[in-house]
């Protein structure tokens, strides 16, 4: 039995904001199934008493002074925007 | 002997004595690029006009106190996921084909202060996801030793440009082996520093808990010079480590007497090419001859490294790459019907297949119902892998083994099977998961292709890695082997 179905792959694509074709969905189903199957070797290990590592450095909150300083200008911030109007980034209508 | 076969210290000497001008040096770099880059294809973007102009300005500073810095006037290449102000930065992705950063990464700022000259941006697997440069959204970089072979990845352009003598050194980034593996395949020296040693500010994030920027060079000494210049705490990167920066060149003593080397049996066992194993055993003999001692040890969880890595790195990537939505920058899809379609079409058209695959895998591993079984599980196994290293380092100074199980493979040989491609990183990945530093240095050839020796050190102990690597390099002449382009 496969570990992941095509419908799940389509759902994941939707969550990831990717438009996939039927063929891509099929390809990813097969490939993700292989990769997840491979990853299941981790279940050989009993990790009940093992703490997860999210990060190797023992970091606590990193704070800085809340000082005002120069940052990008509006022109700089807009320099790479694909579409803009009146100094603002323009996108298609959000509400139908 | 080409200028680009010289060590940084030798070229610095020439500049300092005014026997060579910065502009001549930079011209030599572009001449070489125009001569061989048609074959190697290491560069995505050249910075010829600005670099030539800057070189002329530096000519006037030669012989002054300002020009005493070792890196003054030297041409450098930068991997294309490191932000360079006003110099196109694509991350190897069509989605960012037109991206023109408004700021420099901290490492670039530091190099600018040292007055190196950025000659161009180097090709890579898209968003650093790949081991062969076959995933570049632009073109295939080729191995200078044999252009039918991959240069490795993802910093393939960075390693190939140094091996091809186009620049003295370059910057790469390493998430699961992306500096060390291409350095091994191209026969150059590549270091992944300790996580937190070098600022990631301005490095386009792939997997934030694993990514590190590091130097790729011809020699160990050059590598130490470059790390000296880019390392250090940066308040712009809250995960950079506030620890003392060592004098790396002071470590280059040539003395390894009494040094304790651990050789994990998993690193010279099944799946490792016979030639590669032999080169590593020969290297051990050399070090033994110099008074070092070695013993076989075990890193029992290293076989779980690849699975752990692909779950964690892809999960982090799926979150990091959410920013590429076509709104604030990048190549936006034309005529979307609404905002959701703008996101979906921009990402589907802009990302290549491997990037989509990893975003999908990461999104799946983080999705409700699967989070504990995959993501959390992988984090727990990461702890076990890190513990393996901690245990070995209680008794030993460094861990030594091959960088990769095989030398470079042919272009196209592994593209159809993601899992076979991933397995290529089995010896480099555990190092990133544990956050420790490691270097790859040339240790000979196999059928005309370079083999890399990997030396892994304790966290923040790049100095001992450099000491061992330098001593070995002094005792051998592998680093003088150059590809016949």
Image: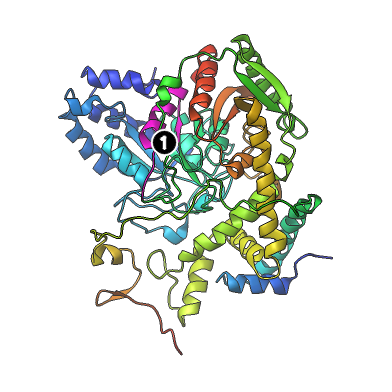
Q: Residue B211 versus residue B413: which sits nearer the camera?
A: B211
Q: Give, as a single range, the part of the protein colored magenta.
A: B215-235
Q: Residue B480 versus residue A45: which sits nearer the camera?
A: A45
Please indicate whether residue B224 sits to the left or right of residue B372 in the image: left
Q: Residue furthest right?
A: A1
Q: Is residue B239 magenta?
A: no
Above or below for B257 versus B413? above
In the rendered image, residue A67, in percent from the top left (x then y), is placed at 26, 59
Could one spot residue B474 in this view of the protein? yes
Residue carrying label 1:
B170
| Spot occupied by residue B355 in the image (x, y as percentages of width and height) | 57, 58
In depth, the one of B231 and B152 nearer the eye is B231
Residue B42 lies, with reference to residue B21, above or below; the image says below
Identify the image quadrant of the N terminus of chain B: top left
For image coordinates 35% across by 45% down, the residue present is: B106
Could you tell me which chain the residue with mark 1 belongs to? B
User: Can you say whether B414 is above or below B462 in the image?
Assistant: below
Q: Residue at point 59% right, 53% down?
A: A54
Other-residue count near label 1 (Cα within 10 Å), few / some / many at <14 / 14–19 / ≥20? many
Position in image of residue B484 (x %, y %): 50, 24
Q: How was this image coloured?
A: rainbow
State the residue at coordinates (42%, 51%): B238
Who is closer to the viewer here, B24 or B183? B183
Give the side of residue B48 with respect to residue B40, left or right: left
Local SS, label 1? strand
Where residue B22 sits, quadrant-wise, is top left
Decide if residue B321 is on the left or right side of residue B397.
Answer: left
Question: Which residue reaches farthest bottom?
Answer: A96
Instruction: Give the x, y percent position of residue B191.
Output: 50, 33
Residue A83 relative to residue B81: left or right: left
């Amino acid at each position: 039995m496969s570990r992941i179905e095509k419908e799940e792959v389509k759902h994941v694509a939707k969550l990831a904001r990717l438009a996939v074709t039927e063929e891509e969905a099929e390809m990813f189903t097969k490939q993700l199934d292989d990769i997840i199957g491979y990853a299941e070797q981790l279940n050989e290990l009993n990790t009940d008493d093992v703490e997860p590592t999210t990060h190797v450095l023992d970091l606590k909150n990193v704070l800085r002074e809340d000082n005002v300083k120069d940052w990008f200008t509006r022109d700089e911030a807009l320099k790479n925007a694909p579409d803009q109007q009146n100094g603002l980034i323009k996108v298609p209508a959000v509400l139908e | 002997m080409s200028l680009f076969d010289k060590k940084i210290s030798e070229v610095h000497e020439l500049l300092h004595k005014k026997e060579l001008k910065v502009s001549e040096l930079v011209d030599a770099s572009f001449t070489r690029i125009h001569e061989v880059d048609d074959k190697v294809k290491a560069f995505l973007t050249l910075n010829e006009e600005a670099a030539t102009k800057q070189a002329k300005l530096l000519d006037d500073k030669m012989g002054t106190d300002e020009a005493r810095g070792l890196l003054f006037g030297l041409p450098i290449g930068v991997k294309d996921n490191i932000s360079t102000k006003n110099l196109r930065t694509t991350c190897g992705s069509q989605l960012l084909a037109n991206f023109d950063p408004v700021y420099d990464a901290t490492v670039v700022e530091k190099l600018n202060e040292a007055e190196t000259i950025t000659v161009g941006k180097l090709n890579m697997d898209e968003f650093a996801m790949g081991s062969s440069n076959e995933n570049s959204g632009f073109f295939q970089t080729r191995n200078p030793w044999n252009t039918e072979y991959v240069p490795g990845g993802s910093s393939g352009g960075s390693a190939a440009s140094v091996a091809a003598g186009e620049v003295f050194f370059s910057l790469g980034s390493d998430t699961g082996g992306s500096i060390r593996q291409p350095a091994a395949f191209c026969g150059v020296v590549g270091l992944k520093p300790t996580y937190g040693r070098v600022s990631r500010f301005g490095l386009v994030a792939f997997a934030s808990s694993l990514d590190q920027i590091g130097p790729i060079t011809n020699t160990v000494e050059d590598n130490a010079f470059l790390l000296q210049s880019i390392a250090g705490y940066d308040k712009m990167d809250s995960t950079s480590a506030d620890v003392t920066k060592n004098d790396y060149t002071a470590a280059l003593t040539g003395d390894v007497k009494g040094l304790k080397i651990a050789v994990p049996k998993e690193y010279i066992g099944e799946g490792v090419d016979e030639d590669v194993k032999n080169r590593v055993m020969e290297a051990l003999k050399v070090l033994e001859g110099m008074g070092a001692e070695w013993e076989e040890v075990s890193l029992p969880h290293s076989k779980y490294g690849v699975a752990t890595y692909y779950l964690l790195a892809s999960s982090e990537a799926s979150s990091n790459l959410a920013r590429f939505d076509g709104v604030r920058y990048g190549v936006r899809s034309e005529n979307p019907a609404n905002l959701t379609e703008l996101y979906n079409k921009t990402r589907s058209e802009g990302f290549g297949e491997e990037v989509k695959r990893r975003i999908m895998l990461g999104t799946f591993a983080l999705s409700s119902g699967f989070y504990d079984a995959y993501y959390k599980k992988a984090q727990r196994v990461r702890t076990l892998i890190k513990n393996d290293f901690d245990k070995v380092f209680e008794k030993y100074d460094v861990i030594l083994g091959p960088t990769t199980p095989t030398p470079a493979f042919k272009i196209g040989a592994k593209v159809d099977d993601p899992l076979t491609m991933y397995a290529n990183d089995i010896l480099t990945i555990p190092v990133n998961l544990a956050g420790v530093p490691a270097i790859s240095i040339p240790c000979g050839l196999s059928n005309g292709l370079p083999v890399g020796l990997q030396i892994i050190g304790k966290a923040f102990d790049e100095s001992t890695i450099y000491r061992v690597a330098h001593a070995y390099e002094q005792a051998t002449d592998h680093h003088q082997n150059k590809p016949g382009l």
